[in-house]
Image (tube, grey):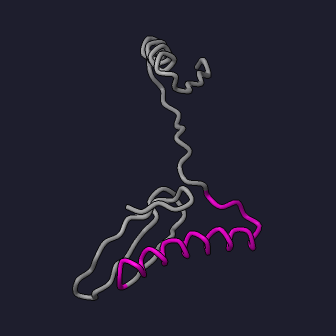
Amino acid sequence: MMEYKGYIGVVNYYPDAKIFHGDVINTRDVITFQGTSVKEIEKAFKDSIDDYIKWCKEEGVEPEKPYSGKFNLRISPELHREAAIAFTKMNISFQSKGL
């Protein structure tokens, strides 16, 4: 895996074509890259992210941010309480909506 500006790329090698192909995995937008060497694939990854951000700016759209680390989950009130206590003890941000 590779990381750049918060985006994570995963690379596969295809020996028959002698090419590396990569996909950014932590966004719903499709961002791909390829190269024939480690140096090329690393550069192509960064270039693809930079091109994506530039394209979004030119189009006036907000680039999709990599996953924020937040997700909604419905659990029992008892487990919610236990999780809130445990996260507080570990000094981890825990925002309860009281649902």
**Relative image position of residue 47 (x, y in whole percent):** 55, 76
Q: Residue 69 lies in magenta, yes or no?
A: no
**Relative image position of residue 59 (x, y in whole percent):** 74, 72
Q: Residue at x 52, y 62 (%)?
A: 4
Q: Residue 60 lies in magenta, yes or no?
A: yes
Q: Within the image, what quadrant is residue 76 found in?
A: top left
**Relative image position of residue 55 (x, y in whole percent):** 68, 73
The front one of 24 and 75 is: 24
Q: Residue at x 28, y 76 (%)?
A: 13
Using residue 63 as the reference point, say whether residue 42 is left or right of it.
Answer: left
Location of residue 14 with respect to 53 vertically, above or below: below
Q: Residue at x 54, y 38 (%)?
A: 70
Residue interval drawn in magenta: 36-64
Location of residue 33 with respect to 3 vertically, above or below: below
Using residue 59 as the reference point, say whether residue 7 is left or right of it.
Answer: left
Q: Within the image, what quadrant is residue 99 found in?
A: top right
Q: Exactly how many numbered labels are in the figure?
A: 0
Location of residue 86 with respect to 23 vertically, above or below: above
Q: Residue lying at the far bottom in this picture: please name it.
A: 17
Location of residue 81 with respect to 43 vertically, above or below: above
Q: Residue lying at the far left in this picture: please name it.
A: 16
Q: Residue at x 73, y 68 (%)?
A: 57
Task: Give the main secondary structure of the magenta stretch.
Answer: helix
Q: Within the image, what quadrant is residue 15 found in?
A: bottom left
